Image: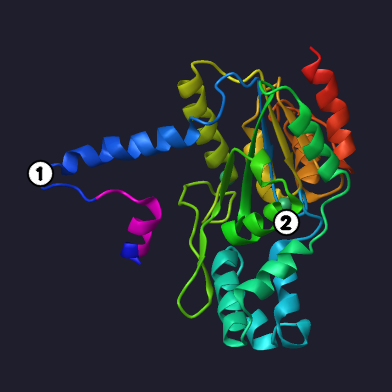
């Protein structure tokens, strides 16, 4: 396990006595990673994946790979609230035992439809001037599901960074998930608080760029998209999918604690609704 992490990052072997340089070497690697992002981008746009970019929940779709396209009752009964990630591990282990392969899972992911107007929204972002949008994805799904879908849809290049749970196939052909990080937020599942992800990213990029973004946009649907949207300011825009949990939580917060939720809220049914608002704001 330790070996595979080492290999994936390709940190060259250290001569003895040079351990202390490791930190700076790692910083260099990270810096060169984000060096491809133009420092001049005016806006940051953050996307959720499940039920935002795609019109389904990818974790639910993998059930199609199970024998008879359903999971046995004993397996479903092992789900514990707040322990979703561990439950998903058991589902993936079961699928591997049933002979479901990497390419089976990939072809299921590739068939998930995009949400209405989402590919049009991506086309809009892609054709804007280079200094307009920095695009990132923050999802509690996993790298394999997301990369499979984005590549098939031909939109992988649009995303400057993808923050999600790391996933790799082990030697038995089982997809193994690792938690993205750990955090202290009471509101979020223990493997991911999207507010921590977004705040850390914005803080780091603001420092690298030497200035803040003009505005931040957040496009999502779920309860776990509410937490990051709470950290947005009055110039920023939250795009919750209409009548989905993120939208309901924003509406309830406006009623219960006026002023607590600061971002402008623009509910969407189609990606075209997002384009309409972005068109106005980029013209400013
Ligand atoms: Mg979602
Ligand atoms: Zn949180």
**Magenta region's main secondary structure?**
helix
Q: Residue furthest top?
A: 284
Q: Residue at x 85, y 26 (%)?
A: 277
Q: Position of residue 226 (x, y in %)?
A: 69, 42
**Which residue is disc 1 drawn over?**
17
Choose top left, top right, bottom left or bottom right for residue 3. bottom left
The N terminus lies in quadrant: bottom left
**Which residue is disc 2 drawn over?**
152
Helix, strand, or loop for circle 2? Answer: helix
Q: Position of residue 200 (x, y in %)?
A: 49, 35
Along the horizontal axis of the image, is 36 left or right of 41? left
Query: Where ligand 2 lies, by image quadrant?
Result: top right
Q: Residue furthest left?
A: 17
| Sequence-earlier tag: 1 or 2 | 1
> Bounds of the magenta span?
4-12
Colour basis = rainbow
Q: Residue at x 66, y 49 (%)?
A: 224
- Identify the mark at residue 95; answer none if there is no mark: none
Q: CA distance from mark 1 to mark 2?
A: 46 Å
**In the rendered image, the vertical position of residue 279 relative to residue 192, given as above or below:** above
**In the rendered image, the vertical position of residue 16 relative to residue 205, given as above or below:** below
Question: Closest to the observer: 266 or 251?
Answer: 266
**In the rendered image, the vertical position of residue 273 relative to residue 41, given as above or below:** below
């Amino acid at each position: 396990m330790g070996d595979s992490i080492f290999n994936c990052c390709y940190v060259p072997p250290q001569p003895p006595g040079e351990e202390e340089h490791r930190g700076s070497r790692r910083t260099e690697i990270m810096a060169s990673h984000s060096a491809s992002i133009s420092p001049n981008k005016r806006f940051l746009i953050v996307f959720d994946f499940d039920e935002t970019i795609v019109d389904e929940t990818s974790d639910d779709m993998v059930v199609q790979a199970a024998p008879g396209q359903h999971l046995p009752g004993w397996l479903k009964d092992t789900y514990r609230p707040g322990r979703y990630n561990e439950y998903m591990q058991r589902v993936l282990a079961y699928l591997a035992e049933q002979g479901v392969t990497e390419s089976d899972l990939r072809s299921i992911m590739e068939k998930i439809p995009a949400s209405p107007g989402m590919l049009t929204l991506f086309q809009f972002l892609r054709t804007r001037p280079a200094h307009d949008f920095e695009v990132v994805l923050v999802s509690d799904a996993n790298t394999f599901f997301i990369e499979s879908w984005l590549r098939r849809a031909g939109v992988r290049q649009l995303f400057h960074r993808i923050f999600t749970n790391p996933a790799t196939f082990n030697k038995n052909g089982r997809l193994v998930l690792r938690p993205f990080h750990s955090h202290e937020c009471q509101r979020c599942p223990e493997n991911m608080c999207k507010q921590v992800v977004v705040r850390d990213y914005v803080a780091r990029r603001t420092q690298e760029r030497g200035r803040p973004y003009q505005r931040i946009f957040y496009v999502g649907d779920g309860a776990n998209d509410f937490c990051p949207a709470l950290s947005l300011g009055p110039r920023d825009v939250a795009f919750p999918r209409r009548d989905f949990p993120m939208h309901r939580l924003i509406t309830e917060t406006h009623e219960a604690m006026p002023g607590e939720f600061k971002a402008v809220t623009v509910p969407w049914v189609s990606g075209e609704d997002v384009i309409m608002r972005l068109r106005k704001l980029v013209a400013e």
